[in-house]
Amino acid sequence: MGKELKIKLIKSPHGRLPKHRQILDALGLRKTGRVVHKPDNPQTWGMIHKIPHLLSVEGVEEKNA
């Protein structure tokens, strides 16, 4: 019942630093326009803060099962 983040890759990883591409791989983003849902925690925010120029982030409430 915690919060979730909706993360979208808005700029291409092509030509970026290897470290930035590794962060995108860790987030599960490989193609422009793809969206992933990740838990709202310090580890996720640490990755987002390294590459904010490549991402779009919004908060989403998790739905009850």
Image (cartoon, rainbow, N blue to C red):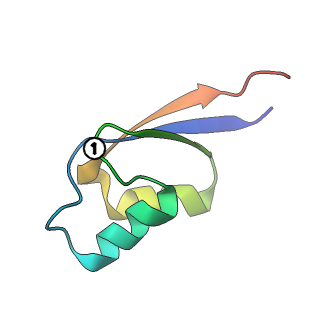
Q: Residues within 10 Å of mark 1 (few under 14, many from 20)?
A: some
Above or below, comparing residue 60 to residue 20 in the picture: above
Q: Position of residue 54 (x, y in %)?
A: 26, 51
Q: In this view, does 13 lie to the left or right of 9?
A: left
Q: Position of residue 35 (x, y in %)?
A: 44, 37
Q: Position of residue 16 (x, y in %)?
A: 19, 68
Q: Is residue 54 left or right of residue 30?
A: left
Quarter holding the N terminus is: top right
Q: In this view, does 28 lie to the left or right of 19?
A: right
Q: What residue is drawn where x is 63% and y is 37%? A: 4
Residue 62, image quadrant: top right
Quarter holding the C terminus is: top right
Residue corresponding to mark 1:
32
Which amino acid, mark 1? Thr
Q: Circle 1 sits in a helix, a strand or a loop, which is it? A: loop
Q: What residue is drawn where x is 49% and y is 57%? A: 27
Q: What residue is drawn where x is 31% and y is 69%? A: 20
Furthest-bottom residue in this view: 18
Q: What residue is drawn where x is 44% and y is 64%? A: 25
Q: Which of 44 and 36 is in front in this view?
A: 36
